Image (spheres, rainbow, N blue to C red):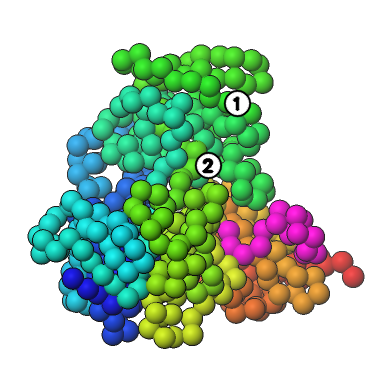
């Protein structure tokens, strides 16, 4: 069995690459071990977590309406119905992907692919009917889209069903009375938000001295305040030294500023990052180069050191984001089809779907300082936003990073309700080389949260109406 292009992995990057390659006239096959397309993002990550975060948001807003004189009874949560609804979302989207593949004549092979050499995959297990009992698949080009898995160090992997990764947390087997989240990154905080709102007493332990250490500290402050208000405990500068399954609970040993301590929780969520999937499927039988962190090395056209193999998404390096994978997948498809494509994005947006949400794109203030890049920072507090005040959520901030010489916008950060929806405008502005005046003088609808993007620009220009901060002469 032969195909011009084989995509190994059916996640956001994989199916984006496969579909575009087919649209460009190439013969394409997707090899995916899971019986459904969608990868981690759709099946065990982005989509199910956002479905559950939507539930958490509704519960939270119902609680907050008491301030307006509108009170609801405490929610009655059916775990079975909640889980079924989440699975319905997954099945709907995955089924749609399968139909799109069929309409594009993309062959779907549900099996594990192992490299024999730089032109051949050995197909193992899965659904043999999808590859006609022909266990070898040859190709002209292969696109690696194998993604990543939750990191689980051996000392935390004690074989207990009460110790979960994000995959287990999203399975939502029950609503535990208490849960410890190990890791103060975005995945742990998102899942902690979900469980906290549906009734679990959530605690977080983080080795570093703060949460979301990779994000702008001005943006993180409102989230930390909210987390401390809603979570049971936040333990910073604290190291987990061991776990012990006690049957009904897990005993957690920790060392923090006040010394060693032992606590018990009904469930423990390990969320300390993700590992690229670059081992166990024969890459050593090719000329592909894998670095010390497990990432496959690629150039700007997503080419690996093996001329027949490309790599995209999580396996090709940070940031591990679905939209970055899809962007890279399309580049790989175009290059294989002979198009002059290359990775040239100036801004890859990142969103933390907590409450409040945090989003940023382009250069951050911290990166500018580390790299010695002179910038000016313009901030607009949401306390001055009419829409934020009307919504009862003024714990937001919009922040621009501006080149002091040219006034071009280099980066943007937003914290607040709906920040993930608002950040896209800044991505376009950065990519288009807009100046801060271009943004400030583009009329934004009133009253909306999107106005804060323009108003932050007005702060830079000294023309802001709702706050008094004239530009210095």
* Depicted 333 relative to depicted 316: above or below: below
Which quadrant of the structure image shows residue 18?
bottom left
Residue beneath the point at 58% across and 26% down? 239
The region drawn magenta spans 360-376
Tell me if label 1 and label 2 are in contact, CB under 8 Å: no
Given residues 203 and 455, the one toward you in this image is 203
Q: Which residue is mark 2?
A: 185
Task: List the residue tagged with mark 1.
Answer: 238
Q: Total number of numbered labels?
A: 2
Q: Residue 301 appears at what percent x and percent y?
A: 50, 74
Q: Is residue 176 magenta?
A: no
Q: Residues within 10 Å of mark 2 (few under 14, many from 20)?
A: many
Q: Position of residue 356 (x, y in %)?
A: 52, 47
Q: Is residue 238 left or right of residue 164?
A: right
Query: Mark 1 or 2 closer to N-term?
Result: 2
* x and y percentages locating residue 110 in the rendered image: 20, 58
Residue at the image position 54 percent from the left and 54 percent from the top:
291
Q: Is residue 60 visible?
A: no
Farthest residue in the right direction? 473
Magenta stretch containing residue 363, yes or no? yes
Q: Is residue 333 above or below residue 382?
A: below
Q: Which element is circle 1 on?
A: loop
Please tell me whether mark 2 sits on a helix, a strand or a loop.
loop
Image position of 16 with respect to 66: above or below: below
Alpha carbon of mark 1 to alpha carbon of mark 2: how far? 14 Å
């Amino acid at each position: 069995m032969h195909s011009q292009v084989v995509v190994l992995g059916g996640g956001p990057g994989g199916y984006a690459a496969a579909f575009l390659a087919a649209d460009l006239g190439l013969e394409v096959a997707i090899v995916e071990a899971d019986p459904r397309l969608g990868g981690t993002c759709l099946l065990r990550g982005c989509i199910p977590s956002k479905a559950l975060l939507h539930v958490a948001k509704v519960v939270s807003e119902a609680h907050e309406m008491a301030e307006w004189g509108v009170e609801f009874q405490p929610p009655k949560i059916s775990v079975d119905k909640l889980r079924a609804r989440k699975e319905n979302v997954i099945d709907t989207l995955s089924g749609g992907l399968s139909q799109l593949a069929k309409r594009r004549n993309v062959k779907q092979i549900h099996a594990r692919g192992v490299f024999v050499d730089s032109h051949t995959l050995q197909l193992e297990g899965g659904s043999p009917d999808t590859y006609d009992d022909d266990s070898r698949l040859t190709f002209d080009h292969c696109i690696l889209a194998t993604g990543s898995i939750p990191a689980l160090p051996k000392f935390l992997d004690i074989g207990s069903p009460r110790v979960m990764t994000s995959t287990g947390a999203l399975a939502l087997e029950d609503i535990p009375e208490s849960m410890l989240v190990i890791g103060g990154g975005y995945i742990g905080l998102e899942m902690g938000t979900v469980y906290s709102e549906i009734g679990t007493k959530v605690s977080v332990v983080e080795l570093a001295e703060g949460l979301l250490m990779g994000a702008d500290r001005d943006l993180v402050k409102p989230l930390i305040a909210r987390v401390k208000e809603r979570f049971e405990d936040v333990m910073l500068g604290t190291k987990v030294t061991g776990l012990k399954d006690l049957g009904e609970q897990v005993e957690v040993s920790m060392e923090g500023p006040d010394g060693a301590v032992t606590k018990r929780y009904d469930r423990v969520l390990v969320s300390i990052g993700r590992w690229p999937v670059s081992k166990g499927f024969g890459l050593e039988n090719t000329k592909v180069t894998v670095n010390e962190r497990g990432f496959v090395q690629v150039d700007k056209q997503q080419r690996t050191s093996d001329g027949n193999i490309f790599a995209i998404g999580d396996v090709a390096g940070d940031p591990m984001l679905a939209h970055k994978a899809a962007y890279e997948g399309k580049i790989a498809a175009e290059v294989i089809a002979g198009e002059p494509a290359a990775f040239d994005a100036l801004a890859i947006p990142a969103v933390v779907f907590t409450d409040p949400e945090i989003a940023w794109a382009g250069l951050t203030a911290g990166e500018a300082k580390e790299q010695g890049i002179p910038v000016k920072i313009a901030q607009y507090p949401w306390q001055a936003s009419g829409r934020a005040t009307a919504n009862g959520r003024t714990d937001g901030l919009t922040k621009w990073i501006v080149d002091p010489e040219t006034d071009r916008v280099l980066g943007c950060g937003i914290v607040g309700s709906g920040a993930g929806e608002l950040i896209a405008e800044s991505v376009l502005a950065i990519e288009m080389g807009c100046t801060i005046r271009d943004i400030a003088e583009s009329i934004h609808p009133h009253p909306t949260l999107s106005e804060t993007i323009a108003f932050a620009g007005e702060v830079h220009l000294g023309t802001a109406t709702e706050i008094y901060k004239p530009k210095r002469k």
